[in-house]
Every structure is written in structure tokens, then in C-alpha cells.
């Protein structure tokens, strides 16, 4: 018996080992490596390109009709490719459920009861805002307007979509404060904490009543506004400075887009000014979901001063005002917005697995500030190909070992709202069932492949990339693309920009795996920071030598993506293959591919770096010896868990292989004997040779039932599989009832005779051993979550990692402990945070101990 034949038989029987007596199939369904290889044949660059053109050629800002249209488009994709049906409603109705309704609650809570692919749309009701009117003026000494900015982006038909939609979504900041402000201009560089501190401490600048202007970069834009607000500023302006574009500038001879690869000086970066590091999601429902009738609070993670994004052309005029020879006249800012409840739509799809209560979630947000050909539609194009690949596997008879949930999140751009509200809505369900979350935001904005993950998934994310081909270079792997750079060179590069870029890249190298740490800024946040779910995120990002990516601008268009960013869409395809391979692998692995030992070793590195860096430079005297001992004990417990998970999987596979051998030879001899008997008698061979020995009338009954069940199950019909969970019994069509009856008959008839052959007790014992290991692996990330959260931002509960309080995007390891030193400078608090982290780790040792 060959290794390939063994693998086929192993795939047939593995579902039974985990408690599904009727899961065995006489058909050669793909499983394991065979399923992975089959999946990888499906995604194509042409498919990703077509999907990009579908989703990225018209505006679809969250809460708009265009956004709802894309939600329905993604629902159609799930229905078409996966054969997904709507839960609990007549087939002809569109499954859009108000969050908090019985239909919405039962759709998610019933995931672990499903037997066939299902899809629906959840409608949440956050408070967001839309722009009304705005202006930016320089006011003369006599009070007259001496200059008025053109705040809209300027485009023509050279880029057809940009020319058509340049003023459809005005330039503004989501969740910004409405109002009018006037004051003298103060330049604050990147608007980082150290920039404001330097202005006060070194230059003695008083920002009370000022209009602060900063450039984009370094930290999340909302925290630039927060810094200005806390220093007494009246308003904040933010612009993109060409210095941050690396070598691809007009100073180096490059032509601005749409005629060349450099920055269009009229481009403007929209975006949210939420204080992301305080909490994400609907500002008015922190920690709980935004239903239509939810109790609202005054948001504490949004600004109290107005702000505007502006172009480089406008910024140049303002910066002239505060040069040594400038007139330093008064700047007047107007930003009127409409704050209101605005509906958003998460599109959800489910592929049920054999192990129904272990769930893998993959997600990508769908909303964009304008067209968003890169952000997020490059990711949507890649996940489109993942869905097609999974659908192809389903059509070949594949069923994942674990359930897969596919999420198309909404309102990420306003502040991770769609994913956060769902995460808060179903926090207990996620905690109980979700074993991993794989995120995709923009999949291609440049030439360098970058991956980030919780440390327990670093090996998993990297190994998948090492097994896939480089998108454009023969003989290299996708992981080799982590060293790729753009080809647009030049002699002039801003030194500060270069230092910042090198520091960012060093963060990826610091782990030793080349996989960065997750902070915030995308939809993995609620999973990592709130619940403690092992998560990953990977994409191609820009280098300093790539065509300038016009982030959140009308120039993030289909033309720019096809002409400058990813001609041929080969990188889109590579990301689709990477995400899909991880999905199939995570769903079908017997033992979850979660590496707790690597994570435990990283904790020691964090502490060493911390004690030699932040703590060493401080005057605070804090003893870390007990915390270090706890980390070392965790490493020992994790190493023992490694031994147990290898032994548990080896035992189960050994049983599977042994039974596969026996079943293979029994089937071979049964088939041979059957043919001999058929040659000398009129008795036909059974359609399923494995039923040899079953009385003929029951054998025929079972065979007919199997065929009927397979035929009915292949029809695009609902199965009524939610069962007793529902508060009412759904109506079912005749074909559905026949499919259920046939399945039941087949299971009962075949299982009755198969129990004598299948070693249930041994398999059950081995499977339960594996299940126990997987529960420990799932619980590992949860072990860093403290219900009291981090001081002053209690929504964030992960004491291992969180977005930096003054970063927003970037990750800070041991965040509560770090901030006790760097922000609070409080020895008592530092001792308390070290002890709190130590206690969590000691409890985690007990959880994973074998």
C-alpha cells in the first residue's frame, strides 16, 4: 500500500475518530496535503483581477449604498462558490439580519450546529459621521480672507475612476469633531508624543489656541489630533510630506501620478481620527455591541477639536507662513460633520467541519474611503480567490476537520467597527470556539512581503510562505519576497524617513523568525487584544523605492494598482495562495499548529530587552526575578506540551494507518472474491465493496440511501440543520427532508455493521487525547488576557502585547508594565504590573500542564 493510498484512507476515517460515525465516504475526497495541493490549483491572477475590478471601481464608504452593494456582492460570492444557503428564512428572502435580533444571534450561535455551508449579513448600528462642509483659510490682519484652500483632490480622465469620483467622497477625517477654530500655526513634525514634548521642553512653545500642523507617518493619525488636543490646540491639520516617499520624488526626477510613479501633490489621505489605542469600535458602545436600540455613551475615544487632512500643495502654502520670513497669519479651520447612527453590514459565511466546536475565522474588511483598489479591495480580491478555492474543494467532496468562518467586515476604516462589534456581540462564543483568526487587509501596496502574527503562529505563517513560489522570480519562494525592494532609485532620501523605515523593518527581524508582532490597525484587534486568539496577518507593503501608494486617496485606484503596483496581479495571487494554504492547514491539522514554546521563549526575550532597555534607563527599582522564573516555568510546561502533542498525534495517526491498511486489504480481497463469485453466479457485486458481509437486502438499502443522500446533498438546497438551537422550526422543502431521511438511514444501517470492525474505543481515546491537547493550545493566548485590562484603556486586555498608547498601530510588548515606567514613572504601579503579569503566566502554566 503506497503512502498516497494511506493518506486517502486516513482522510476517510479521521472524521469518525472525532465522533462522526457517518462521515466516512467511499469517494476519494481530498484531505491533508492532497486538499492543499488541490486548493492551490484554483486561485488565479485573472480571477483576482476580475474581483478587483468588481469591488474597486466605484466608491463604497461604510454606511453608503455602494457599501451595501458590495456586501451583497460578497454574499453572492459565498452562495455561488460555496453553495451557501441562508439560515432560518425562506430561500427567496435576502438574509440581512439586524444585530441583536433572534435571526442574527442564532445565525452565529448556531454555527456549531450546521451541516452545510451557510451565509448571511449582520447589520449593526454604530454612531459614525459624514461630512457636511469644510474650509481652510488664511486670515489677514484686517480679518479678510487672503487665501482659501481648494480642499478637494484634483483629477482628470487620465485616471478614469479618479476623474469621475474625485469629489464624491470629500476630503475629511472620519469620527472627527465638528466645529470652527482659528489660531496661529504650529508645526509638530509627526505629531508623536516626543515631538510635542520637544516643542514644550526645548522650544518653549505654547500651543494653547493654536492650529497644529503635522505630517502623516509614525503613529496613528487620531493620536496626532489627541496630542494636539492635550496641549491645548484649537485644531489640527495633517498632510502627506513627499520627504516620506523615499526615493520616488520629483527631486529625484520622477513624474507625479497619474503620469508617473511619484506623489500627486493634490492627493489627500482621508482616515479616522478615533483614538485607536484607547478602544476601537463604535465610540458610543465601548465593550458591548451597537444594536439599533443600544444604550449610548459619550465616546471617550474621539477628538474634542476639529481636524482636516490636506494635500501637499496646500501644506506648502501654510508652511511658508511659519518660516523665518513668514507672515504667521491666523489660520481658520471649518469642519462641519453630521454625527448619527449609520447602519453597516458584515457579510458572514460558514463551512461546517467535522469538529463543529473548533472554529477557524478568516476575515478581510470591505469598506473603503473612496474606491480603495489597495485598501481594502486588493485584500478582497485575494480573499475572493480563497473562497473560490475552498468552493472547489467542497465540490470535490472535501469537508474540513474544523469549521471555517469567512467574514467580510464593514466600517474598518472608521475604527475597526464591524469586527469589533461582532467580537463584542459574541465574545463568549469566540472564547469557547475560535481557535485561530487569519486576517487580510490590503494584500498588495508594494513589493515587499511582510507577515505579522502572535508569536505562537510565527512558524506557521512563515512555513506556509516558504512552501509557495515567489510571485515574479523563478526559483525563489514567497518568503524570499520579505527581502524584495522597489526598483525606483534616487540620490535624495530624507534621513529621518530612512531612520524610521529602518527601525520599522528591524521590528520584523527582532523576533528571529522575521514575523512581526501584532499591535492594532486592522480587524485582528478584537481577537488578539480582547479575547486572546492566536492570529496572523500578511501582505505586500511598500518600500522606499516603490511607486508612491496614495493611501486613502482617490488615487488609490484600479488604474494605479494595475499599472504601477501589481501589473499582472501576481502578488494578489501569492497572497491568496498564502491565506488559503493557512486556512486549509489550520482547519485540517489534527493538532493545532500553535507553537506555544516559541511564544514562551519570546516572552523571555521581551523581558531581557525590557530590563536592559526601558527599566535600565529608569530610576525606578523593580525586581523582575519572579516574573522571569514564571516565564521559565512556562517554557518548561510548554516543552512538555510539545512532547504530548506529538505523542497524541502520532498515536491517532498510527491507529488510522493501521486501520487503513486493514480496510484496504479487506476491500481488495472482497472485491476480488466478489468478481470470482459474480463469474460463477448471477449475484452482482455490491456498489460499495466495504459492505461485504452485510445481508444483501440491508446492503442494497444502505447503498441506495448513500446514493440518494449524496445526490440530495449535492443540490443547492437548505438542510434545516440548525436543529434544537432555534426558537422555531424552519420550513423545509421536500428535497431537504428526503436528504435528511436518506442520510439518517445510511448512517444507521452502515454504522450498525461497521461498529464490529471499527475500533471505536481506541479511536475515541486517541481522539480525546488530541482534543485535550488542542484545548490547551487554544487556551494559551487566552492566558495573557486579564479581565481588568490595561490602565486607562481597559478595553485592551492582553498584558502580553497591545498597540502602544501613543502609537496606535505599532505593538508594545508587556504594555501595562511598559507604561508604568514610560508614562506613569511609578514604581508601585510597576511592581503591581509585574506581579499581575507574573500571576497570569503562573496560571497559564497550570492550564497547559500535562
Image: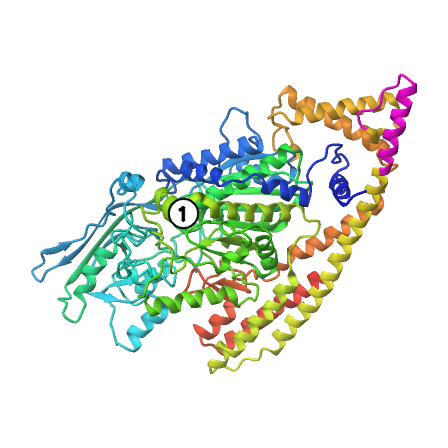
Q: Which residue is mark 1?
A: 374
Visible in this render: residue 569?
yes
Please provide percent x and percent y for residue 832: 55, 73
Residue 630 appears in which quarter of the rendering?
bottom right
Visible in this render: residue 426?
no
Q: Secondary structure at mark 1?
A: loop
The chief SS type of the magenta part is helix
Q: Who's the residue at 40% across and 47% down the image?
A: 374
Indicate the quadrant containing the N terminus: top left, top right, bottom left or bottom right: top right
| Residue, far right | 680
Please provide percent x and percent y for residue 148: 15, 53
* In this picture, residue 827 sits left or right of residue 589: left
* In this picture, residue 707 sits left or right of residue 165: right
Q: Front-most of 666 and 348?
A: 666
Please provide percent x and percent y for residue 785: 57, 60
Q: Who's the residue at 53% across and 30% down the image?
A: 80
In magenta stretch: residue 803? no
Residue 843 position (above or below residue 525): below
Which region of the structure is painted magenta? 665-688
In magenta stretch: residue 676? yes
> How many other residues sit within 10 Å of disc 1, few (<14), some (14-19) or many (≥20)?
many
Indicate the quadrant containing the C terminus: top left, top right, bottom left or bottom right: bottom right
Residue 526 position (above or below residue 710): below
Q: Front-most of 589 and 156?
A: 156
Amino acid at each position: 500500500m503506497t503512502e498516497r493510498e494511506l493518506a486517502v484512507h486516513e482522510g476517510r476515517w479521521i472524521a469518525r475518530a472525532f465522533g462522526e460515525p457517518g462521515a466516512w465516504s467511499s469517494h476519494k475526497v481530498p484531505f491533508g496535503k492532497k486538499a492543499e495541493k488541490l486548493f492551490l490549483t484554483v486561485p488565479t491572477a485573472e480571477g483576482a483581477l476580475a474581483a478587483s475590478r468588481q469591488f474597486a471601481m466605484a466608491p463604497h464608504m461604510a454606511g453608503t449604498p455602494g457599501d451595501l452593494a458590495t456586501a451583497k456582492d460578497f454574499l453572492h460570492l459565498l452562495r455561488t462558490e460555496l453553495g451557501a444557503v441562508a439560515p432560518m428564512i425562506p430561500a427567496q428572502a435576502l438574509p440581512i439580519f439586524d444585530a441583536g435580533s433572534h435571526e442574527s444571534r442564532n445565525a452565529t450561535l448556531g454555527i456549531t450546529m450546521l451541516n452545510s455551508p451557510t451565509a448571511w449579513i449582520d447589520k449593526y448600528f454604530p454612531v459614525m459621521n459624514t461630512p457636511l462642509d469644510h474650509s481652510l483659510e488664511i486670515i489677514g490682519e484686517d480679518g479678510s480672507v487672503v487665501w482659501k484652500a481648494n480642499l478637494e483632490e484634483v483629477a482628470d480622465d487620465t485616471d478614469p475612476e479618479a476623474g469621475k469620483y474625485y469629489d464624491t467622497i470629500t476630503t475629511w477625517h472620519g469620527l472627527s469633531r465638528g466645529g470652527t477654530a482659528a489660531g496661529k500655526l504650529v508645526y509638530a513634525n509627526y505629531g508623536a508624543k516626543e515631538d510635542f514634548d520637544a516643542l514644550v521642553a526645548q522650544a518653549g512653545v505654547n500651543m494653547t489656541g493654536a492650529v497644529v500642523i503635522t505630517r502623516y507617518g509614525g503613529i496613528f493619525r487620531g493620536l496626532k489630533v489627541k496630542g494636539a488636543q492635550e496641549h491645548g490646540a484649537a485644531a489640527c491639520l495633517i498632510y502627506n510630506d513627499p520627504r516620506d516617499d523615499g526615493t520616488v520624488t520629483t527631486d529625484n526626477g520622477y513624474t507625479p501620478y497619474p503620469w508617473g510613479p511619484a506623489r500627486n501633490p493634490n492627493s489627500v489621505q482621508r482616515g479616522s481620527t478615533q483614538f485607536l489605542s484607547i478602544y476601537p469600535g463604535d465610540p458610543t458602545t465601548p465593550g458591548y455591541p451597537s444594536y439599533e436600540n443600544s444604550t449610548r455613551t459619550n465616546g471617550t475615544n474621539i477628538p474634542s477639536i476639529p481636524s482636516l487632512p490636506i494635500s501637499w500643495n496646500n501644506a506648502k502654502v501654510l508652511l511658508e507662513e511659519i518660516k523665518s520670513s513668514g507672515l504667521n497669519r491666523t489660520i481658520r479651520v471649518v469642519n462641519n460633520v453630521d454625527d448619527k447612527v449609520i447602519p453597516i453590514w458584515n457579510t458572514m459565511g460558514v463551512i461546517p467541519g467535522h469538529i463543529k466546536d473548533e472554529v477557524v475565522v478568516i476575515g478581510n474588511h470591505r469598506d473603503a474611503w473612496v474606491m480603495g483598489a489597495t485598501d481594502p479591495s486588493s485584500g478582497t480580491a485575494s480573499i475572493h480567490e480563497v473562497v473560490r478555492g475552498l468552493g472547489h474543494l467542497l465540490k470535490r467532496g472535501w469537508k474540513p476537520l474544523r469549521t471555517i468562518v469567512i467574514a467580510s467586515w464593514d466600517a474598518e476604516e472608521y475604527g475597526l467597527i464591524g469586527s469589533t462589534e461582532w467580537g463584542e456581540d459574541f465574545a463568549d462564543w469566540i472564547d469557547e470556539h475560535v481557535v485561530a483568526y487569519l486576517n487580510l487587509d490590503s494584500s498588495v501596496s508594494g513589493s515587499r512581503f511582510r507577515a505579522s502574527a502572535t508569536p505562537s503562529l510565527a512558524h506557521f505563517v512563515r512555513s506556509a510562505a516558504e512552501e509557495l513560489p515567489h510571485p515574479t522570480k523563478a526559483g525563489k519562494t514567497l518568503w524570499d519576497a520579505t527581502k524584495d525592494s522597489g526598483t525606483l532609485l534616487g540620490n535624495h532620501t530624507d534621513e529621518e524617513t530612512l531612520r524610521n523605515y529602518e527601525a520599522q523593518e528591524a521590528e520584523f527581524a527582532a523576533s528571529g523568525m522575521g514575523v512581526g508582532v501584532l499591535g492594532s490597525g486592522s480587524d485582528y484587534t478584537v481577537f488578539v487584544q480582547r479575547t486572546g486568539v492566536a492570529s496572523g496577518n500578511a501582505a505586500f507593503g511598500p518600500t522606499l523605492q516603490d511607486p508612491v501608494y496614495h493611501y486613502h486617496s482617490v488615487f488609490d485606484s484600479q488604474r494605479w494598482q494595475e499599472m504601477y503596483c501589481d501589473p499582472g496581479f501576481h502578488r494578489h495571487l501569492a497572497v491568496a495562495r498564502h491565506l488559503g494554504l493557512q486556512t486549509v492547514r489550520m482547519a485540517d491539522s489534527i493538532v493545532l499548529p500553535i507553537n506555544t514554546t516559541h511564544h514562551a521563549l519570546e516572552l523571555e526575550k521581551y523581558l531581557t530587552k525590557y530590563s536592559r532597555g526601558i527599566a535600565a534607563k529608569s530610576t525606578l527599582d523593580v525586581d523582575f526575578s519572579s516574573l522571569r522564573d514564571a516565564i521559565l516555568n512556562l517554557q518548561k510546561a510548554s516543552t512538555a506540551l510539545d512532547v504530548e502533542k506529538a505523542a497524541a498525534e502520532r498515536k491517532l495517526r498510527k491507529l488510522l494507518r493501521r486501520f487503513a491498511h486493514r480496510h484496504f486489504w479487506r476491500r481488495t480481497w472482497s472485491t476480488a472474491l466478489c468478481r470470482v463469485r459474480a463469474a460463477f453466479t448471477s449475484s452482482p457485486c455490491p456498489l460499495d465493496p466495504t459492505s461485504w458481509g452485510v445481508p444483501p437486502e440491508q446492503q442494497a438499502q444502505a447503498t441506495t440511501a448513500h446514493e440518494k443522500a449524496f445526490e440530495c446533498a449535492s443540490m443547492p438546497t437548505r438542510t434545516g440543520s440548525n436543529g434544537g438551537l432555534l426558537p422555531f422550526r424552519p420550513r423545509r422543502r421536500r428535497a431537504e427532508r428526503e436528504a435528511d431521511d436518506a442520510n439518517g438511514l445510511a448512517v444507521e444501517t452502515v454504522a450498525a455493521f461497521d461498529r464490529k470492525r471499527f475500533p471505536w474505543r481506541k479511536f475515541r481515546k486517541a481522539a480525546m487525547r488530541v482534543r485535550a491537547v488542542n484545548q490547551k493550545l487554544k487556551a494559551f493566548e487566552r492566558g495573557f488576557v486579564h479581565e481588568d485590562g490595561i490602565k486607562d484603556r481597559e478595553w485592551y486586555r492582553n498584558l502580553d502585547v497591545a498597540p502602544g498608547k501613543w502609537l496606535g498601530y505599532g505593538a508594545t510588548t508587556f504594555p501595562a508594565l511598559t507604561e508604568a515606567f514610560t508614562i506613569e514613572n511609578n514604581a508601585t504601579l510597576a511592581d503591581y504590573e509585574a506581579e499581575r503579569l507574573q500571576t497570569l503566566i503562573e496560571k497559564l502554566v497550570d492550564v497547559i500542564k500535562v
